[in-house]
Image (cartoon, rainbow, N blue to C red):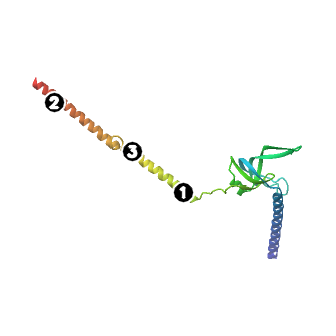
Amino acid sequence: MRWIWIVVVILVLAGLYIWMYRYARKRQEAFDAQYEAAKERREVFVLHKRIVRERPQSGWLKFARFKTYQVVGRVNVSQSLRGIQMSRMQTVTFQTTKSEYDKIQPNHKYKMDIAGNYIGYVLAPPPVKENKKDRTKAKEKGTDKGAAKSKKTSAASQGGPGGRGLRGGQENAAEAKGRLRRLVRLGRRGKDGDTDHS
């Protein structure tokens, strides 16, 4: 009897999965058709972007929070009032997918395919992702440069104006003392010579 219940549970879960898949696919197809019918290409100046967790406004999923990718930008909106075409800049909060969100950088202007407040495609090069190997190489180069600089500074301090760092300074001090002693001796000898001649 146990295996019968196991088979029943598996069939129920498989049926629920198939129903969920078809429901999500039908909604996605309806959204894609609506987007293709209403999309238009515009230039948008991106002010900033952010990731926000929000709840759906309707449906049985409104109790759950989902991650949304939002882009705030300025777009030129044109309107016709009484036969007069007017255009003005308007700040709009758009929503998009993660792949298009990664392409966008703040304080840049992009051409985008927009339908309502949804960004479907951004004309921009894909973001360049740095590998971990490149990062480690850059760190190693930085450490090598720092070691070379420290070696240069230590060599400069050792080979300063006395010649050899602390030891050179001590030797120079000793030489200076020796010179002073010699001068004193020469001075004394000169005095002694003067007294002898007198």
- For disc 2, the marked residue is 189
Name which residue type carries label 3. Ala
Name the mark nearer the viewer: 2 or 3: 3
Residue 25 as seen in the image, left or right of residue 182: right
- Distance from disc 2 to disc 3, alpha carbons, whole Å, reads 42 Å
Q: Above or below — where is 80 with respect to 118?
A: above
Residue 115 position within the rendered picture, expressed as x and y whole percent measured from the top left: 80, 54
- For disc 1, the marked residue is 136
Q: Tell me, for residue 151, which label it has, or none.
A: none
Badge 1, how many Cα within 10 Å: few under 14, some, many 20+?
few
For the C terminus, the quadrant is: top left
Name which residue type carries label 2. Arg
Q: Earlier in the sequence, mark 3 or mark 1?
A: 1
Camera sees residue 68: no
The residue most toward the top is 198
**Disc 3 element:** helix
Q: Earlier in the sequence, mark 2 or mark 3?
A: 3
- Distance from disc 3 to disc 1, alpha carbons, whole Å, reads 30 Å
- For disc 3, the marked residue is 156
- Distance from disc 1 to disc 2, alpha carbons, whole Å, reads 72 Å
